[in-house]
């Protein structure tokens, strides 16, 4: 759940869409606001689950 990998996957998923640069910029901005701003909460919860199962993150 590396933010860099998530961003790269999103970029790769949008490549074949043929969106214009302005639309791509909007898509990146939206994903940044919706995905990356909430990612810390998800990672903290995921790490707690892993630690609870004896797996160090």
Image (cartoon, grey):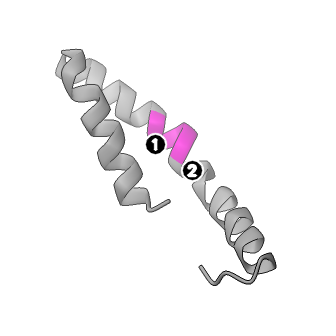
Q: Residues within 10 Å of mark 2 (few under 14, many from 20)?
A: few
- Residue 17 against residue 38 in the figure, above or below: above
Residue 19 seen in render: no
At horizontal 20% and vertical 21% (from top left) the residue drawn is 16
Locate residue 28 relative to residue 39 in the image: left or right: left
Residue 25 found in image quarter: top left
Locate residue 6 relative to residue 24 in the image: left or right: right
Q: CA distance from mark 2 to mark 1?
A: 7 Å
Badge 2 element: helix
Residue 32 highlighted magenta (yes or no): yes
At horizontal 74% and vertical 83% (from top left) the residue drawn is 54
- Residue 36 against residue 53 in the figure, above or below: above
Task: Identify the residue under disc 2.
Answer: 37
First along the sequence among labels 2 and 1? 1
Badge 1 element: helix
Q: How many marks?
A: 2
Towards the viewer: 36 or 46: 46
Q: Which residues are magenta?
A: 31-35
Q: Which mark is residue 32?
A: 1
Q: Which mark is residue 41?
A: none
Main SS type for the magenta part?
A: helix
Q: Residue 22, percent across and down?
A: 24, 21
Q: Residue furthest right?
A: 52
Q: Residue 27, percent across and down?
A: 38, 27
Mark 2 touches mark 1? (CB < 8 Å): yes
Locate residue 24 relative to residue 28 in the image: left or right: left
Q: Residue 53, percent across and down?
A: 77, 76
Residue 20 highlighted magenta (yes or no): no
């Amino acid at each position: 759940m590396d933010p860099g990998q998530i961003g790269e996957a999103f970029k790769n998923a949008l490549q074949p869409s043929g969106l214009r640069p302005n639309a791509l910029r909007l898509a990146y901005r939206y994903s940044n606001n919706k995905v990356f701003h909430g990612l810390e909460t998800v990672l903290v919860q995921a790490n707690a689950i892993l630690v609870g199962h004896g797996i160090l993150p």
